[in-house]
C-alpha cells in the first residue's frame, strides 16, 4: 500500500474529494484521516493557506476528543503561527491563537495575539472579526491582564516586608492593589436566559447550579472540558464536547441565530456546510429529547434556528474556561 506521504498533490486532492464525501466530524477516524491528508498537502504546497487553515481546524477537532489534547493544541498553535507568517493580516488566525494561548495559560502571548487580531486589516471577509469577536478580544485581553496582575501580586506578597523597604514605593502600590482586590473571589460565570451576566463565588455557583435545588430551570453546566451537562427538574444528561459549542451558541442567542452565522463560526471548513449544520442540529435535538421528549428545544425559523424552551435557563462555567469560544469562534 502506497504511503500517503509519497502521493502527489493531484493524488492527495483525489483523496480529499473522497474524504469530504464521507464527512462526519463526530468520527475520530475521519478527522485523523483528514489531518494526514492536509499535513501532506501542506508539505507539498507550503504557501497554500487553505491547507494550513483546514489542518489547524482538524487538529482542534482532535483536541475535542481529548485523545491528543496536549499535542493537538500545540500543533494547532504551530499551524496558526504558520498561517499568520503566510498571511500577516489574517485577524481570525490571530484571534484563534489568542484563545489557544489563553487555554494553555500563556497569558502574555494570549494578550499579544488578541491585540494583533484587532490591529490587522484583512482583505478577505472570512478572515475579519465581526463586532462580537472584537469585543471578545478586548474582554480576554482584560481577563489575561487581570490574571497576570493577581499572580504577580501573590508572588510579591511572599517577599519579606524588610526586603520591600529597599524600594519603598512598592509597598504603596501593593496596598492600592489589595484595596482594589478586596472583594470576594468570584471565579465562576453565570448567564441567565442568554443575556444577564454575573460572576459568582464558589458557594453561589454550587447553590445556583444544583439541578435538584433549582427545579423548573434548565442548567447548562461546564464542569470541565469533557464534563458538560444539561439538567431540568432534577434530571440530567451529558452533552458531548462536539455538541456543546452549538448548544451554547443557541442558548446565548435567544432571538435566534442565522444559518449563515452558525456556519461561519462552526462549519465553514466543511465541504457541504449546510448539510453539516443540519446533521448537527438533528443530533443535538435527539440528545435533548432524552431530557424531555415533549419539549421542542430548538425551533427552525426563517433562515436559521432558535432556542425555544418555555423554561428559564442558566449557563455556568469557570471564568478561565474558553473552550466553547476556542471551538466556536
Image (cartoon, rainbow, N blue to C red):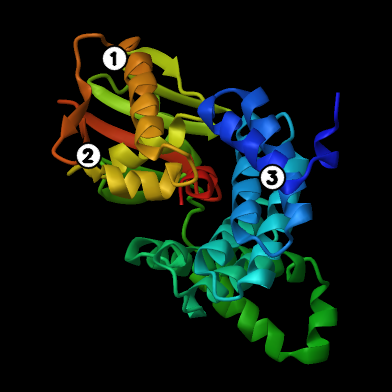
Q: Please tell me which of labels 3 and 1 falls first in the chain.
A: 3
Tags 1 and 2 in contact by the CB under 8 Å rule? no
Estimate the x, y position of residue 25 in percent, counting from the top left.
Answer: 54, 29
Label drawn at residue 233: 1
Location of residue 195 with respect to 127 vertically, above or below: above
Q: Please tell me which of labels 1 and 2 falls first in the chain.
A: 1
Q: Which residue is mark 2?
A: 304
Count residues near mark 2 (Cα–Cα under 10 Å), then give few for <14, some for 14-19, many for 20+. Answer: some
Question: Which residue is painted at 70% across and 31% down in the image?
Answer: 32
Task: Please name which of the two marks, 1 or 2, marks the residue nearer to the observer.
Answer: 2
Residue 142 shown left or right of residue 100 in the figure: left
* Distance from Cα at disc 3 to Cα at disc 2: 37 Å
Task: Please name which of the two marks, 3 or 1, marks the residue nearer to the observer.
Answer: 3
Question: Which residue is painted at 27% across and 11% down in the image?
Answer: 292
Quadrant housing the N terminus: top right
Q: Which residue is mark 3?
A: 10
Question: Which residue is painted at 60% across and 30% down in the image?
Answer: 19
Estimate the x, y position of residue 125 in percent, counting from the top left.
Answer: 39, 66
Name the quadrant containing residue 12. top right
Question: Which residue is painted at 15% across and 35% down in the image?
Answer: 301
Location of residue 163 with respect to 65 vertically, above or below: below
Amino acid at each position: 500500500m502506497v504511503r500517503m506521504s509519497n502521493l502527489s498533490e493531484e493524488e492527495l486532492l483525489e483523496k480529499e474529494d473522497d474524504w469530504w464525501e464521507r464527512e462526519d466530524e463526530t468520527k475520530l477516524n475521519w478527522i485523523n484521516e483528514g489531518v494526514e491528508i492536509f499535513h501532506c498537502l501542506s508539505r507539498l504546497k507550503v504557501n497554500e493557506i487553505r491547507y494550513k487553515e483546514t489542518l489547524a481546524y482538524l487538529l482542534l477537532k482532535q483536541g475535542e476528543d481529548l485523545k491528543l489534547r496536549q499535542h493537538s493544541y500545540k500543533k494547532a498553535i504551530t499551524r496558526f503561527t504558520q498561517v499568520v507568517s503566510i498571511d500577516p493580516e489574517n485577524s481570525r488566525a490571530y484571534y484563534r491563537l489568542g484563545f489557544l494561548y489563553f487555554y494553555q495559560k500563556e497569558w502574555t502571548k494570549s494578550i499579544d495575539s488578541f491585540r494583533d487580531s484587532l490591529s490587522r486589516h484583512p482583505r478577505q471577509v472570512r478572515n475579519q472579526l465581526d463586532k462580537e469577536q472584537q469585543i471578545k478580544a478586548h474582554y480576554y485581553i482584560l481577563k489575561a491582564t487581570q490574571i497576570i496582575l493577581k499572580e504577580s501580586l501573590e508572588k510579591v506578597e511572599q517577599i519579606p516586608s524588610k526586603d520591600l523597604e529597599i524600594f519603598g514605593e512598592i509597598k504603596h502600590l501593593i496596598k492600592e492593589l489589595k484595596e482594589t482586590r478586596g472583594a470576594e473571589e468570584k471565579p465562576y460565570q453565570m448567564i441567565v436566559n442568554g443575556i444577564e451576566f454575573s460572576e459568582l463565588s464558589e458557594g453561589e455557583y454550587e447553590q445556583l447550579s444544583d439541578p435538584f435545588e433549582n427545579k423548573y430551570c434548565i442548567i447548562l453546566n461546564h464542569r470541565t472540558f469533557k464534563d458538560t451537562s444539561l439538567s431540568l427538574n432534577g434530571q440530567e444528561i451529558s452533552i458531548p464536547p462536539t455538541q456543546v459549542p452549538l448548544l451554547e451558541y443557541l442558548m446565548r442567542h435567544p432571538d435566534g441565530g442565522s444559518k449563515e452565522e452558525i456556519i461561519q463560526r462552526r462549519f465553514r471548513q466543511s465541504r457541504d456546510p449546510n448539510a453539516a449544520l443540519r446533521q448537527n442540529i438533528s443530533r443535538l435535538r435527539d440528545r435533548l429529547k432524552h431530557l424531555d421528549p415533549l419539549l421542542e428545544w430548538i425551533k427552525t425559523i426563517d433562515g436559521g434556528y432558535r432556542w425555544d424552551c418555555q423554561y428559564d435557563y442558566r449557563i455556568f462555567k469557570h471564568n478561565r474556561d474558553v473552550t466553547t469560544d476556542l471551538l466556536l469562534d
